[in-house]
Image: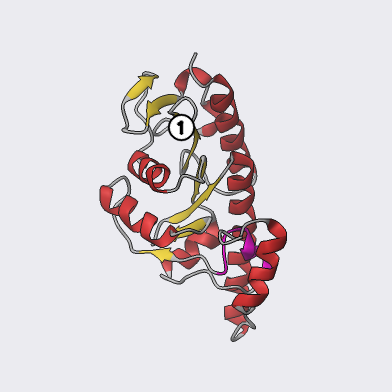
Amino acid sequence: MLLEKEKKEVIAYGKRMIDHGLTTGSGGNISIYNREEGLIALTPSSMHYADITPEDMVVMDIDGNIKEGNRKPSTEINMHLLVYKNRPDVNAIVHTHSIYCTAVACMGWDLEPVHYMIAMAGTTVKCARYATYGTPELAKYALEALGNRGACLLGNHGLLTAAPDISRAFSTAEHLEFVAKLVCITKSMGKPNLLTTEQVETVMDKFGTNPYK
């Protein structure tokens, strides 16, 4: 079996994604890229995370050629491949439909620094333009919004996090959902008191998430 370790990790984090309320049913997707082997383990399309087994997982190369698995890969295969091709520091991607991040994305807003935990991903988290799910256009817009950061919002869709490993990618998704919730609450109360770029960069240095350090 190819990428046995990676398959098990993707399945485990898929279940966590459901348990932690970051998506529902089969929404979203997760992948891990083993760059040494040149292979990617990706969740299958339209399967509830609780039901996925290692045999259901799809393994492909960076060009999208299926190397193992009989199921259809996630519809967001284009987005995963494009990020991996353009971000050599990224080895894991988590795409969620978490409520508050998606609410902010449905407003077309960038995620603002109302709390220092945004430093998990950058000084801000940009919102990509809307495109139909699974299309090359969505992949392109996501990459543009991601830039060199650890996450982006997908317009009227959800959240994408990208990190050196799956633990960091998942943790980023969790913490950004917390930040997005604060954005929604504070904007309902008035004008949020935003942190400065310098203040967030100080936290990024502490977290080790500053791409310029």
Give x and y (percent) for residue 174: 63, 53
User: What residue is at 37 percent from the left and 28 percent from the top?
Assistant: 61
Q: Is residue 115 visible?
A: no
Question: Does 149 appear in magenta?
Answer: no
Nearest the eye: 157 or 32: 32
Which stretch appears magenta?
A: 116-123
14 vs 127, left or right, is right
Give the vertical position of 199 relative to 2 (above or below).
below
135 vs 209, left or right, is left
Outermost residue on the bottom side: it is 190
Nearest the eye: 10 or 187: 10
Give the vertical position of 86 relative to 124 (above or below).
above
What sort of colour scheme is used for the picture?
A: secondary structure
Outermost residue on the top side: it is 1
Image quadrant where one finds the C terminus: bottom right
**Main secondary-structure element of the magenta-colored stretch:** helix
Give x and y (percent) for residue 104: 49, 67
Outermost residue on the front side: it is 213
The image quadrant that residue 7 belongs to is top right
Outermost residue on the right side: it is 206
User: What residue is at 48 percent from the left and 17 percent from the top?
Assistant: 2
Give x and y (percent) for residue 139: 33, 50
The image quadrant that residue 181 belongs to is bottom right
Type of residue at label 1?
A: Thr
* Mark 1 secondary-structure assignment: loop
User: What residue is at 38 percent from the left and 55 percent from the top?
Assistant: 143
The residue at which mark 1 appears reads as 43
Give x and y (percent) for residue 11: 56, 30
Nearest the eye: 90 or 76: 90
Within 10 Å of disc 1 (Cα), the crowding (few <14, some 14-19, many 20+) is many
Question: Does 121 appear in magenta?
Answer: yes
